Amino acid sequence: MIILAGDVGGTKVNLALFRAKGGEVVREAFATYRSADHESLESIVRIFLGGQPRVDRVCVGVAGPVSDGRCRLTNLSWSVDVDGLREASGAKSASLLNDLQATAYAVPFTPPDGFAVLQDGDADPNGTVAVLAAGTGHGQAFLFPAGPGRLVPFATEGGHVDFAPRDAREARLLAFLQARHAGRVSIERVVSGPGLKSIHEFLAGDTGLAENPEVASQMRAKDPSAVIAESGLSGRSALCHAALAMFVSLYGAAAGNLALVLLPRGGVVLGGGIAPAILPALKEGAFLESFRNKGRFRPFLKGLRISVLLDPAAALTGAAHYALTL
């Protein structure tokens, strides 16, 4: 059986072909496309398959809420539905799920060396697992135990809950973003790639730090969030370092809040592309302090296992396994 798996975000589309063998899936082809260069997901699918559909099943994770086999993406002006996917791929069956739901489903099928551990706490193999990821947007999902050794992925739109500042500086950040976003500010406006850029811009005014001219030039020529992260890690820019530090602290707070909601005794997993890229910063301590800093629940949170999913394309594996189970 050949499965076409996809991961559709606001910036890029990842597609892969998997061959199902004895309950496992093996990736045989992979490609990445810039979303802005194409008019629809279906057109990308046709390009990827070379006009010769040879797919039995297709499953795509999309960055947005899925209802009745349809999704209008949150950060991209596309609508995707299962009928269009079947037609474009020639598959007999097609399914859509939230992209973080697909990432969550990859967790049980990822080997131990596919994770970097931030906090080596206990992880109940039959416990709920919390998954969150910062990228172009901010996604949250979870795996719920449905019997011994069986975890089922569930989607949420937790990335769009209100951003709640914890101190005076974060209150100023909130006011800065409220002026930009017509009053309401979600976690996604802060803990995401664009959020890192916004934090950088806020701190430039709040601290009076001037940006390194070379770094400023690179930010104009490349993805500014990636440049801020790289320059913050390397120490080339004091402003980027401060922005990254604030971002990491806010990421930890968001992860801790999700853990309080879900009580994930199976662990907390950071997915997406940003976490692996800033792993040294995540290990410095600010992330864990913000994660644990929940008053009387500090001992509980300190006992949870927290890890980073190192494969930024893990959602493809999750989507493929999801298709296989159907």
Image: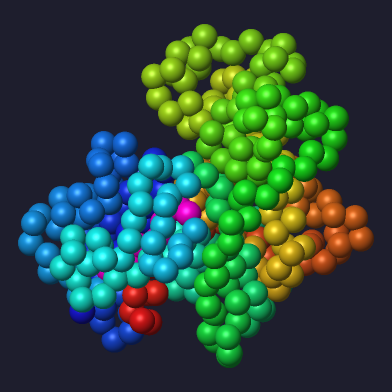
x and y, in percent, of residue 240 in the image? 61, 24
Identify the residue at image location x=56%, y=12%.
212
In the image: residue 289, left or right of residue 95: right
Is residue 120 in view?
no
Is residue 145 visible from the viewing direction of this image?
Answer: yes
Between 119 and 80, the one lying in front of the other is: 80
- Quadrant of residue 97 within the rendered picture: bottom left
Q: Quadrant of the C terminus?
A: bottom left
What is the x, y in percent for residue 7?
37, 56
Above or below, 117 relative to 13: below
Q: Eyeballing the image, is 234 above or below 152?
A: above
Of residues 275 and 170, the one drawn nearer to the viewer in this rendering = 170
Question: Does the magenta segment cover residue 63?
Answer: yes
The residue located at (40%, 42%) in the rendering is 76
- Magenta-colored span: 58-64
Q: Main secondary structure of the magenta part?
A: strand
Residue 83, horizontal then vertical, whole percent: 26, 66
Q: Is residue 143 left or right of residue 311?
A: right
Name the spot of residue 288 as percent of width and height, x first. Answer: 74, 50
Tell me the residue at 32%/52% (across/down).
14
Tell me the residue at 28%/56% (across/down): 15
Magenta span has 251? Answer: no
Q: Is residue 296 left or right of residue 176?
A: right
- When asked about the image quadrant of residue 320, the answer is bottom left
